[in-house]
Image (tube, rainbow, N blue to C red):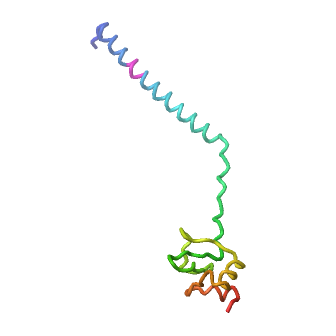
Amino acid sequence: MIEPSAEERLTALRLLRRVQVDDLARTDRWIAQAEQQLADQQKPKPPPEPTRAPLPRPPYVTQTRHGRPPILHGPDCWVRDDGIGTLAIDADSAREGLAGAVIEACDVCTPEAELGMP
């Protein structure tokens, strides 16, 4: 067997050291990741965010119309639009508005019947 020269042996040892340093760095990264995972598991988890219940849908809504009195819709009216130009009112105000002809009842949901009006 032929012995390597001192220069070849030194080159091989430097290569071996570089490989071992890379291996050690990789092992250190794995240790850091494992420690982080363990720390994350041991952290107390924050309480869940409270969920907000949706606001109740107002029972009666008046919807404005151009050049005509507002129209009154009941709670389950499928024509009803709760968007712009609407105003939520209570049952007493709805009765007053219908009695005074300030608002008109929807022909679809007929809220006057639900309000006990003729």
6 left or right of 107 in image: left
* Outermost residue to the bottom: 118
Task: Give the x, y percent position of residue 62.
Answer: 60, 76
Location of residue 21 with respect to 102 vertically, above or below: above
**Dominant secondary structure of the magenta stretch?**
helix
Q: Quadrant of residue 76?
A: bottom right
| Residue at x-position 55% and y-position 35% | 34
Q: Is residue 70 magenta?
A: no
- Residue extent of the magenta highlight: 16-20
Residue 114: x and y in percent read: 67, 86
| Residue visible at 57% across and 84% down in the picture | 106
Please state which of residues 58 and 71 is positioned toward the viewer in this rendering.
71
Q: What residue occupies the far left of the structure in this picture?
A: 2
- Picture quarter containing residue 22? top left
The residue lying at 69 percent from left, 89 percent from top is 117
Would you say 49 lies left or right of 27 here? right
Numbered label tally: 0
The percent coordinates of residue 102 (x first, y second) are 62, 81
Residue 101 spot, x, y in % from top left: 63, 84
Quarter of the image that includes the C terminus: bottom right
Query: In front here: 87 or 6?
Result: 87
Q: Is residue 82 above or below residue 74?
A: above
Q: Residue furthest top?
A: 6
Q: Quadrant of residue 39?
A: top right
71 to the left or right of 50: left
Closest to the observer: 3 or 28? Answer: 28
